Every structure is written in structure tokens, then in C-alpha cells.
Amino acid sequence: MGGFRFEQCGNIEGLYLVEPQVFADERGYNFEAYHAGSFREAGLDMVFVQDNLSMSAKGTLRGMHFQKNYQQGKLVCVVCGEVFDAVVDIREGSRTYGQWFGTVLSAEKKNMLYVPEGFAHGFLVLSDTAVFSYKLSEHYHPEDESGIPWNDETVGIRWPIPEDMTVLTSERDSCHPAFGEGSALKPKRNRKTMGAAAHENVMDETGSGRMEHQKFFQNNE
């Protein structure tokens, strides 16, 4: 049973959209959310050691997070609701360093994003609420956490924020140092040098607009 479709995200090496094969009938549906062998066959061989779930209200923006020394690869998806998920390549030596990618993940689509070590990650909740699932290749180390501003002007992520949406973020996420101020991560051993020409990658954006900023929520994501 099962199966997956893997699609590399633009020219960013190691970053993949994942779509599972879904079996549905009048009773409902069933699918494999993860299968280590299938991922290995596709060359995606991260070993996951921790699963997290978070629930967030509409307008919540968590990001852009990373760990400097205990780098976390991730497989992320939405169990309930819809989010705009974004990552920034901060791998030192990558030819797509500083490039961002964004896509809509939703419970309806059942799509996932496979994020290797060396990326900053964040998401914006588009639905009334969203339950977000993370598989992580490294445990959470609070003393090692860092980030870059979700609205960093150099990176320039195009968040699909409607004019009537109030963005809810944490005090910590309002105070991250700007991109380039210590955000480059050295690649882990046995990870080959990243390649490809830099450009923006955007999929399934839902709109854009001005934003009102409020402080809300404090935790590791």
C-alpha cells in the first residue's frame, strides 16, 4: 500500500514537495503519511527522531526559525486547516543561499514539504485554525535556537497576507537579527555542496496585502 510523488522545489537542492497516494471511498480515506523506504529510494534519507504538533489561530506567523549547531531537517504537513509554509536556504556555500521558497500546505491537499538541514522555516496560518505537524531530524535545543525576521527586507518573502488580516507573532520572532548577521550554517559532513542558480520559488500563493502587527504566542515554533 502507499506511494509518494516527490518534486524538487525549483533549483533548491534537497528541498522537495511530497504528495502521498490517497485511497478514498464512501467511508473516507487512508494514506501513508511517511514510509522510510520510499523516501530512501527517492534519495531522501534523513532519520527523524522527534514529532511535534502545534495548533495556531488564523493570522499566526511562526518563524523564521533554525538551530545553529543542532541543525534540524523537517518533514512538515498540515493535519487540520491551511498554512503558507516558507523556508530560506541559509547553507553556507550553497549557490541558492538566501533564496526562499513558499507553498500552501493544507489538510485537504495532504501535501508535505521535505526540508533538509540548513534552512530557516516558518509558516502563516490562513484558515481559522491550523494543526501543524513536524517530523524532526534533531531534538529541540532551546539554547541553540535562532532565527531571522519573517519580514526581512533582504530575503523578501512574499507572504500572502490579506489587508484585513492581523498578523500574530511572538516577541522573540520580532527580535531576530537581520539575514546575514550570523545566519549562515556550515553544511553537515557527508552533505554535498549545494548547487543551482539563485531565483525565487513560489507555489500556490493566495494573495498579498498590508499587515497589522501584534505580539502573540511564545514557544519553539
Image (spheres, helix red, strand yellow):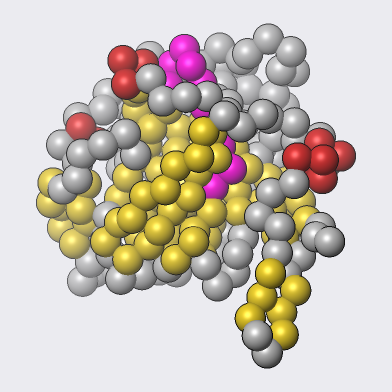
Residue 178, given in percent of the width and then of the height, sits at 30, 26
Numbered range of the magenta stretch: 67-76
Magenta segment includes 170: no
In the rendered view, tell whether residue 73 sits above or below residue 162: above
* Numbered circles on residues, count: 0
Determine whether, in the image, residue 119 is placed left or right of residue 10: left
Can residue 196 be seen here? no
Q: Quarter of the image holding residue 210? A: bottom left
**Which residue is more in the foreground, 221 or 7?**
221
Give percent across and percent down for residue 177: 27, 23
Looking at this view, name the residue that lies furthest to the front.
Answer: 27
The stretch drawn in magenta includes residue 70? yes
Q: Nearer the viewer, residue 48 or 63?
A: 48
Q: Position of residue 142 (x, y in %)?
A: 32, 21
Q: Give the residue drawn at x 65%, y 40%.
A: 15
The relative height of residue 139 versus residue 128 in the rendered view (above or below) is above
Q: In front: 213, or 24?
A: 24
Residue 105 seen by the camera: yes
Q: Residue at x 81, y 36 (%)?
A: 40
Q: Quadrant of residue 12?
A: top right
Which residue does the image show at 66% across and 55% down from the upper left?
Answer: 33
Magenta stretch prevailing secondary structure: loop
Residue at x 20%, y 32% (from the top left corner): 172
Residue at the right extreme of this rendering: 41
Instruction: Locate the C terminus by quadrant.
Output: top left
> 82 or 207: nearer the eye?
82
Place residue 48 in its image quadrant.
top right
Q: Position of residue 53 (x, y in %)?
A: 42, 48
